[in-house]
Image (spheres, coloured by chain):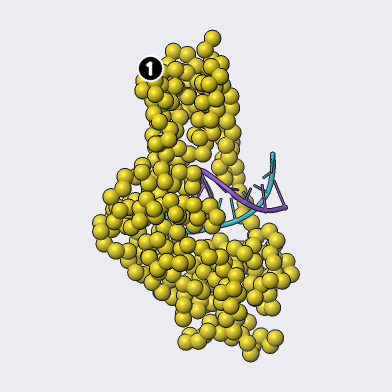
Chain colours: A yellow, B purple, C cyan
DNA sequence: AACACGGGGGA
DNA sequence: TCCCCAGTGTT
């Protein structure tokens, strides 16, 4: 292939979109996308709200996991108006297990802030809303409203870094490059095609370059693992003590505040062993027994929970109606088993 | 610019 | 088991 003839380039040899027409390299990706795209439900709708829900779910979350939540969420909150009427906790319950719970809280805030108005139809307008950053604003603006603004997500970042052999592309560089490729004829389809390429072909670990429509002019093809360089990550170790206080109806839960799992409910916990006494006092528990350890990993945190079981004169909650994190679900399993065994009843 | 924030899937 | 992935908002 003669690159210059089939693919417009700028002076540095980059592929370059030409306003007013769809270039050969763009057609190659679009053809690949038409043939290989997954039939995802948010690709079957024109409803901006449904697209917004999908894009928020897709923040930091894989497609196959987002699928379940997408259906659950829209069934419970089919429109912006109904979401605006919902309580935060009700929304968190639907979001339970999906992680990054601030997304759900922000989505409620967004609906309430709009107060019955429709979604802004522009990138800039969407960007003003809580929980919507550059990625989501670009995705919704282009897919739902046809605005020619390029998305940059993790997939696009990887594709572009490899295409131009960049080890550490900056956000500004990525924005500029992504925008330079965009097919303004149908920006929404273009953006989805590029992301799908990153999700199915230009994958992190074992890229399938032989199946890539852009392999012919990819500068990083010979050594894709160099591009982009992985970011260093740090894992903190955390040890906490939790009280599973069995009340007359169920276990005692507290609503968590603060950034970590904020808004969800969970077992009361403290950060020092000495603090357990305070928990017993607070819930009228005479005595507690250690029943085991729960380990749970967040991306940047390895948590070990020492779980104590005790009995409280208070009522307690039904864990089925409370939004609980995976961590607290694990503690719940351990605590329920201990109650059934009756081990601590000496 | 650095950091905090869940969870799950693949090697 | 370990390793890796990924937007937004706050500091």
Name which residue lies at 68% across and 88% down.
A2
> Quick one: which residue is furthest to the bottom in this view?
A5
Residue at image mark 1: A313
**Position in image of residue A273 (x %, y %):** 52, 22
Is the N terminus of chain A in the top left, top right, bottom left or bottom right quadrant? Answer: bottom right
Side of A285 relative to A297 (left or right): left
Name which residue lies at 59% across and 63% down.
A199
What chain does mark 1 sit on? A
> Quick one: which residue is furthest to the top in this view?
A346
Name which quarter of the figure residue A93 lies in. Answer: top left
Side of A223 relative to A10 (left or right): right
Name which residue lies at 42% across and 46% down.
A94
Query: Dot 1 surroundings within 10 Å: few (below 14), some, or many (20 or more)?
Result: some
User: Which of the two residues, A117 or A125, is positioned nearer the viewer here?
Assistant: A117
**Position in image of residue A246 (x %, y %):** 44, 22
Say what secondary structure mark 1 lies in. loop
Name which residue lies at 48% across and 21% down.
A276
Residue A32, compared with residue A336, is above or below; it is below
Q: Is residue A78 visible?
A: yes
Residue A42, compared with residue B10, is above or below; it is below
**Position in image of residue A325 (x %, y %):** 48, 39
Total marks shown come to: 1
């Amino acid at each position: 292939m003669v690159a210059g003839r089939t693919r417009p380039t700028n002076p540095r040899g980059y592929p370059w979109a030409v306003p007013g027409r769809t270039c050969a390299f763009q057609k190659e990706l679009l053809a690949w996308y038409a043939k290989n795209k997954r039939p995802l439900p948010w690709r079957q709708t024109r409803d901006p709200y449904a697209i917004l829900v999908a894009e928020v779910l897709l923040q930091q979350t894989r497609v196959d996991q987002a699928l379940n939540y997408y259906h659950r969420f829209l069934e419970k909150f089919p429109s912006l108006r109904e979401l605006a009427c919902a309580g935060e906790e009700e929304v968190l319950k639907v979001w339970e297990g999906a992680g990054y719970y601030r997304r759900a809280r922000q989505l409620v805030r967004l609906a309430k802030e709009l107060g019955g108005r429709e979604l802004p139809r522009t990138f800039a307008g969407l960007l003003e809303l809580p929980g919507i950053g550059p990625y989501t604003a670009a995705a919704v603006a282009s897919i739902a409203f046809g605005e020619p603004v390029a998305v940059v997500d993790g997939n696009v970042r990887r594709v572009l870094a490899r295409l131009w052999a960049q080890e550490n592309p900056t956000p500004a560089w990525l924005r500029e490059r992504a925008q330079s490729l965009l097919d303004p004829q149908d920006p929404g389809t273009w953006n989805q095609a590029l992301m799908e390429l990153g999700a199915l072909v230009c994958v992190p670990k074992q890229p399938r370059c032989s199946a890539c429509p852009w392999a012919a002019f990819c500068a990083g093809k010979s050594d894709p693992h160099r591009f982009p360089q992985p970011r260093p990550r740090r894992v903190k170790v955390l040890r906490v003590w939790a009280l599973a206080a069995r009340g007359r109806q169920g276990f005692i839960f507290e609503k968590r505040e603060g950034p970590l799992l904020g808004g969800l409910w969970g077992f009361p916990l403290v950060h020092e062993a000495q603090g357990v006494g305070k928990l017993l006092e607070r819930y009228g528990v005479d005595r507690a027994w250690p029943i085991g350890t729960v380990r749970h990993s967040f991306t940047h945190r390895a948590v070990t929970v020492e779980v104590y079981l005790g009995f409280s004169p208070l009522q307690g909650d039904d864990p089925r109606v409370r939004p609980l994190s995976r961590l607290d679900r694990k503690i719940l399993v351990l605590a329920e088993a201990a109650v059934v065994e009756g081990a601590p009843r000496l």
